[in-house]
Image (tube, rainbow, N blue to C red):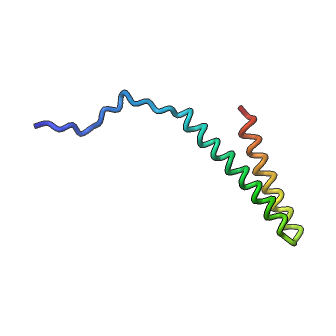
Amino acid sequence: MTTQTQTDTQNVKVDRNASAETVVGFAIIGCLVAGAVGIDKAMEMQNGWDVLLCLLGSVAAFGMVFYVYFRR
């Protein structure tokens, strides 16, 4: 009696380009959310240095979105 231990995966093709675009899309959405949260938190802070750091982080997050989106 013989048993098959390996599955036949020769006909399975993975579309890696679509999955890579999906990951980049989620990264862009995450950076946009991080930038918006940074701006929102900066409005509530009382110390000037804290506001500056939050706004710099927001600019960096939005800058990352523009870099990823426009480098194509």
Q: Is residue 72 above or below residue 22?
A: above
Image coordinates of residue 68 in percent, x first then y, are 71, 40
Using residue 71 as the reference point, say whether residue 2 is left or right of it: left
Q: Quadrant of the C terminus?
A: top right
Q: Is residue 63 toward the left or the right of residue 27 in the image? A: right
Q: Is residue 57 above or below residue 20?
A: below
Quarter of the figure with residue 34: bottom right
Task: Name the image quarter holding the N terminus.
Answer: top left
- Residue, x 31% and y 32% (percent of image)? 8
Picture residue at 56% right of the left edge, 34% below the top: 18
Indicate the position of residue 43 as horizontal and vertical percent values: 84, 65
Query: Which residue: 89% across, 68% down?
Result: 48
Is 2 left or right of 30, judged from the image as shown? Answer: left
**Hey, which residue is sitting farthest left in the picture?**
1
Which residue in the rendered view is the most extreme toward the right? 48
Left-right relation of 6 to 26: left
Q: Is residue 11 above or below residue 26?
A: above
Give the quarter of the image for residue 37. bottom right
* Image spot of residue 38 (x, y percent): 78, 59
